[in-house]
Image: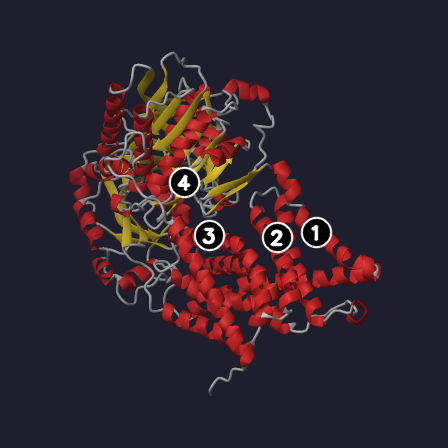
Amino acid sequence: MALRFDARDVSAFKFLFSLAIMYGLMSLLVHSVIYMKFIEPLGIDAPLDRFSEARAIEHVRVLSHEIDGRQEGRPGLREAVLYIKTQLESLKERAGSNIRIEIEESVVGGSFNMMFLGHGISLGYRNHTNILMRISSIDSQDTDLSVLMNAHFDSPLGSPGAGDCGSCVASMLEIARLTIDSGWIPPRPIVLLFNGAEELFMLGAHGFVRTHKWRDSIGAFINVEASGTGGLDLVCQSGPGSWPSFVYAQSAKYPMANSAAQDIFPVIPGDTDYRMFSQDYGSIPGLDIIFLLGGYYYHTSYDTVDRLLPGSIQARGDNLYSAVKAFAESSKLKNAHERDFLGVSDDYNDERAVFFDYLTRFMIFYSRRMAVVLHSIPIAIFLVMPFFLRLLNSGLCCCFSTLYDFIKGMILHATGIMLAVIFPVIFSILRLLFSSYGMNWFANPYLAFMMFTPISLMGLLIPRIVCRVFPLSQDVSVLKTSKEALSDEARFWGAFGFYASLTLAYLVAGLSGGFLTFFTSACMLLAWISFYISIKFCGHQSVRSTVFYVIPLIPYLTYSVYFGGLLVQFVIEKMGMMGALPPPYGYYIPDIVVGAIVGIVTGWCVGPLISICSSWLARSSILQFLLNFSVIALALSSQFFPYSTEAPKRVVFQHTFLTADANQVVDSSYDFSVVDSNSLLFLFKYAPEVAKELHVGPEFSFGTANMSNQRTFMALFPVSFLFSRSLKFPARSDEILKQYRHFPHMYTYKPQMMSSDGSRRVFLELSLGSLEEVWVAVLNITGPLSSWSFADNKLPVPETAEGGPPSYICRLSGASRENWIFWLEARNSGDLRVDVAVLDQILVDEAKKLKRVFPAWADVTAYSSFLSSYIF
């Protein structure tokens, strides 16, 4: 049947396509901003008084390509130490006589408890290497206030670590060169910490902040990190106090920061060295600055130098150098003793400031106290406006009727926002019911916008169509104003009240992201004034008056596309590593999350327009078009494969050896897991060569397969809790017997000691055998444990796995031929069970062959794990 459009339908489509063009242009601008297209990287021959991305990339090339692996336990980590020291020594040799350069290699060790990913764990470490460079004036002292810049040079399992964090180390090496070659003499010493054990849960930073002679002199710090290969280098955390972010706002050449990141960051599964310096131990004011994009390659073998986003390191370097100079000149620096004495002063209190950059062009910053005032204004305007509009001419009763209409308008707008989120969620579930796999948007993020934005926009328009005639409480005859004008007024102020209420809610909750809704409210107020003036000349329902409403909103709309687009891209990239939740609901979670995020972003990007512009868009023909577009997009999306070499699927491959003593293997298996919603069955279906190698037939199912449990992946604790439905396949063990003479084993080295209160102390020694590239050893202790020799004799929060008894987890790391010696204390004579898992990065030839069978769109993290159990 042919579609019939009247003149209003034609106008509606023209208006819709005009908005699409406007948002398209905004998206192109935002894309160029977040991918650093406007930054011109300086070449290798750039002036010596400028930061050069090309010079920094040469360091990344050496660290990630010429050095074969910078993981703990591998020879490449020591090669990285020698390379960094050589570079620093060459800088020292050409430094002027008026500057003092100190270079130190520091070996750290210790033990402490922490919570990570919501799990209690104890960490014991030894022989981890930090490299430090201190740049100061010739007459400086060790106790002088200083500024710390930190980055780690170790890399995660199986990754070259170009982005994480070769790019960070390279940036700091170039900043060290720039400082020396530019002739700048820091008014306060600059300490550059290249730490060698961040991937093992921030051990290098802990070692520095607990043991180094310069630790108490640090007045501020900048932690440089990467969660990808470039893009925005965002200030994700700042504090204690607000002045570190204020210094950044004043100094950064390309400011990239917003305080809302501090609300979001705790939700992300991970942590950085910022925690050690500013929260758990140091209480040092500082910044946590992180590359956000390119997360597809984060912690994968694809994190290579050719995937670094051009311009990103240049912008990072310019910002870091400006910030470190500003910190060095700040009068607010205090050493550890002064901070303890000051306690909660204005500069060092824990109040979060509110700040955000506008497209990296400039940064807006205001204190928490100012936010209390500013963020309360919109709700005050909303409550006062009915009386301002009606009190003088129509009386108090009409004022309350107007307020009631505004509240009804707010409810309608809130309903539209909720539907804008609910509709994409429903569509994501419906698509999965008829699809063989999820996350089809993963390698093609534009699909998420094509599938979910139209249906979300449809949700925004539904309340206007359902309530085409606004249920006014005001008496039109008394006010002598058209019903259409009063309806638009109620809808606008209802939407305004919705954003004003959200701004107040952010404030009351103590969060820092209220700037977004405050910005919305401020621009909407300007838009209403513009619209109100324009209707006197252009008429109420004219296109021109609507355009006059839209124009003042453009600064906000552009920012909302910037903020929302970055959020969607970041979330999509991280969905490949957020964990595989158990069925039946785990399969739906990633698509639901992405659908909901796109719906929220659509709501805040388009929501402020709806109150006025919906008079043009609220047509059944528009809704049909949006619905049909979404259905077609959903159908087409099923033709796209979720993964590619640019967006790989992450696979964990553990070759497990169950040992009974120093040279006996009881069992051997290949254990596999994934960390997203497409299970191993998906992998076997679309990688038949892997299925063939593992003898997986078409009748294979989870119901009949051998499953791996959490204890199998104990070497990766607590990351192993991101796994679900892991599978076990039989493997041969003869090759490992030829490769190693001795396996990890534990034994008592002296008789246990009994106490009068019935407790007993067991003295243990752990040998790592003849393993060559040990990453970590993990102890899982169950039984009546009351104390141990780790972490100042304090036990961590216990774990309870799969309904078993409480257990205590300790991770041990650090290269050494010496055995680990420790004691455990039991409160009674009950048995202490110690399960040991040792992760070795060497694979036998058969496992290497199996790893090579996997397709290029799957990134495989492969290692060997030696499991053994003991009763004492």
At label 4, the amino acid type is Ile
Position of 851 relative to 106 (above/below): below
Question: Around disc 2, counting alpha carbons within 10 Å, would you say few (fewer than 14), some (14 to 19), or many (20 or more)?
Answer: many
Please tell me whether mark 4 or mark 2 is closer to you in this view. 2
Give the residue at x 67% y 47%.
Answer: 377
User: Quick one: SS at disc 3?
Assistant: helix
* The image quarter in which residue 139 lies: top left
Residue at numbered disc 2? 521
Q: What percent of the width, then of the height, locates residue 115? A: 47, 37
**In this figure, which residue is indicated by the disc labeled 3?**
562
Amino acid type, label 2: Ser
Is 701 situated left or right of 404 in this image? left
Q: Residues within 10 Å of mark 1 (few under 14, many from 20)?
A: some
Q: Which type of secondary structure does the marked residue at label 1 adopt?
A: helix
Q: Are marks 2 and 3 in contact (CB under 8 Å)?
A: no
**Residue tagged 1:** 381
Asked whether 217 or 140 is in front, the reply is: 140
The mark nearer the N terminus, 1 or 4, is 4
**In this view of the protein, which residue sits in the foreground, 470 or 849?**
470
Residue 420 rendering spot, x and y as whole percentages: 54, 63
Work out whether mark 1 precedes mark 2 in sequence or the reverse, and give the earlier one. 1
- Picture quarter with the C terminus: top left
Say whether marks 1 and 2 touch (CB < 8 Å). Answer: yes
- In this figure, which colouring scheme has been used for the structure? secondary structure
Identify the amino acid type marked 1: Ile
Residue 290 marker: 4
Report, in whole angstroms, how far the alpha carbon at label 2 lies from the one at label 3.
Answer: 18 Å
Tell me the crowding category of disc 4: few under 14, some 14 to 19, or many 20 or more residues within 10 angstroms, Cα based: many
Q: SS of the residue at dot 4? A: strand
